[in-house]
Image (cartoon, helix red, strand yellow):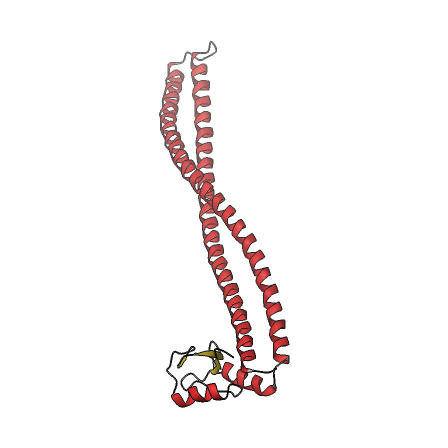
Amino acid sequence: MNTLINLYHLQSKYDRLNELKREDRKIKLHFSHMEASAKLKFVEWKKMQKTLENLQKILKDKEIHMKDLEHQTDEYTKSMYSNRASKNPKELSDLQKKIQILKENLATVESDVIESMNQVEIEEKHFRQVDADFNRLKQDFNKENAWMKARTQEITQEIRATEDDIQHSREGLSQELLDAFDHAFLRGQQSAVVYVQGAVCSGCGTTLSRRLIDSVHRNPGEIHYCENCHRILVRKND
């Protein structure tokens, strides 16, 4: 039998449908923010990784340069003290000067190497912390992603089932009731059908006139509207 309470039940199904859609949007928005945050963390991680790689390359180049200077110094020293070395004072003096210059350059490069080693050590320590944080973030992101996919799939299935239920319920209502419901629904109200609680509209909280209350109770099969929000009114005991 088509009664006004059927409209309230239909409204409950629409409420559930809207609730599911809101949850779906909320989950996707939350995941979108989480994804954006993860991308920023990845950019930071990648930037630090590149910085560390550059510092390590600089250190390696300096170490190579230092070894080259050490090799040259050793070669000139051996040459100076070799039995085959010229005893020409000028040549010996030139060798000594070259060795001295190499040693000075070597001292400078050694200082640079030590400074670079300190920089690399500091950056490696910082990167290890960022890398650990990023790995934890990836794990959390993957868990959240798996939960989000599972939950949104459940929501999609329930939305389809609710929409089918709504269609089935609408088919069991008279066109007069459907027209009244759709008209109230299209006004943009969150609920098209609400209960009368005592003398108050449960939709907007307005105290209804005595004439309207009497009519709702005397004629429960007729369609009545709230005088303020224009929702369809249903008796609580219908």
What percent of the width, then of the height, locates residue 109? Answer: 39, 29
Residue at 47%, 85% in the rendered image: 217
Q: Nearer the viewer, residue 113 or 21?
A: 21
Tally of marks: 0
Which quarter of the image is occupied by the N terminus? bottom right
Q: In this view, does 93 lie to the left or right of 20?
A: left
Which quadrant of the structure image shows residue 117? top left
Residue 174's x, y, as percent?
Answer: 61, 85
Q: Which of 194 and 43 is in front in this view?
A: 194
**Among all residues in the image, which is located at the extreme top?**
83
Q: In this view, does 77 lie above or below 185?
A: above
Question: Residue shown at 47%/55% (left/top)?
Answer: 34
Percent x, y for residue 221? Answer: 54, 86
Q: Nearer the viewer, residue 101 or 26?
A: 26
211 with respect to 181 (left or right): left
The spot of residue 81 in percent (x, y) is 43, 12
Please tell me which residue is depicted at 56% across the width and 60% down the height of the picture.
152
> Is residue 47 shown above or below 176?
above
